[in-house]
Amino acid sequence: MKTRAITGFFFVAVMLASVLLGVYAFTLFFLILSVLCVEEFYRLISTDAIKPQKRWGLALAISIYLPLSMYYFRGEPLKNVLICVPVSVLVIVAELYRKYQNPFHNIAYTLLGVLFAAIPFCFFYAIAFTDGTYSSHYPLAFLILLWASDTGAYLFGIKLGKHKLFERHSPKKTWEGFIGGMITSLLAATAISVYFHELPIIHWLVISLIIATAGTLGDLSESMLKRSVSAKDSGSLLPGHGGLLDRFDGLLLAAPLVFVYLQFISAF
């Protein structure tokens, strides 16, 4: 428990620093994080029958993240992200020269690793530029709402949890915990609206519901992934917490949906 608490403290501190220290730290940190998450995904699903192309997969993740970040950060042409197209083609071509028994499984998992573990961080990065320039308020609010939802779900689940939410993939999750997570996320959104004035309170409340719901589904999806490969944790990088995907599973589905919502409301 002590190890878990210490790791959790430093994890939160590093996350907050990456957001609050400005756009350079934010850009670099989430580039590194997305690469590490993709690499962790490949290690998790690698077996004698499945051999994803780690190098080309990581190259693909970088070829998407860097041009996209330069578009938001420095105003460079968005068309630069098209470099990911030839890299994607090379993933297929490279498999022609490998001698494994399931080539299309390898291609599929290589591409899935980028889609599942890297693209969500691109959406999270873009959220910080909702108003055209970098603002720490959007990613900071996202993280606070996600943490509030996770904390509420855990506490309510421990105290009141009786009805299983999705026992097949996560036996410990309950409907009571899910509702508790929504409540704490809504309370956090109300507090955020007092200090962050980029959006009216109604939008912060809607975003909190998106994060609480999609965050839970992301957690379940990552649990489904681990169960499919008979793994308890996605990795061991964070002592007491497992791997990076274990810590960011709530972001995987929530970040794209929050980005879409912010784009939708900004159009009106």
Image (spheres, helix red, strand yellow):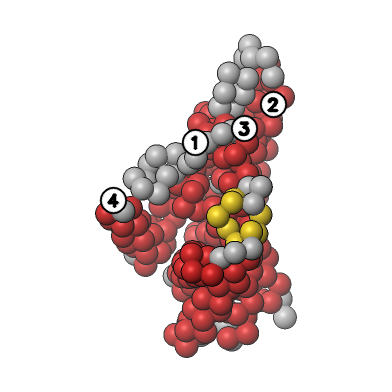
Residue 137 appears left or right of 94 = left
Q: If you read the primary sequence from the N terminus, does the residue marked by circle 3 or circle 4 appear first?
A: 4
Circle number at residue 3: 4
Residue at image coords 52%, 28%: 55
Residue tagged by mark 3? 110
Residue kind at label 2, given as amino acid type: His
Residue at image coords 49%, 48%: 246
**Secondary structure state at the residue bearing disc 3:** helix
Nearer-the-camera pick, 71 or 62: 62
Residue kind at label 1, given as amino acid type: Glu
Q: Is disc 1 surrounded by few (<14), some (14 to 19) or many (20+) residues within 10 Å? A: some
Instruction: Report which quarter residue 56 is drawn in.
Output: top right
Work out whether 259 lies above or below 246. Answer: below
Q: Nearer the viewer, mark 4 or mark 2?
A: 4
Residue at image coords 69%, 26%: 105
Q: If you read the primary sequence from the N terminus, does the residue marked by circle 3 or circle 2 appear first?
A: 2
Q: Is disc 2 surrounded by few (<14), some (14 to 19) or many (20+) residues within 10 Å? A: some
Q: If you read the primary sequence from the N terminus, does the residue marked by circle 4 or circle 2 appear first?
A: 4
Q: Is disc 4 surrounded by few (<14), some (14 to 19) or many (20+) residues within 10 Å? A: few
Residue tagged by mark 1? 39
Q: Position of residue 136 (x, y in %)?
A: 44, 70
Q: Nearer the viewer, mark 1 or mark 4?
A: 4
Q: Position of residue 170 (x, y in %)?
A: 59, 50
Check whether the beta carbons of the residues at disc 3 and disc 2 lie within 8 A of each other. Answer: no
Residue tagged by mark 2? 105
Residue at image coords 53%, 29%: 54
Q: Is disc 3 surrounded by few (<14), some (14 to 19) or many (20+) residues within 10 Å? A: many
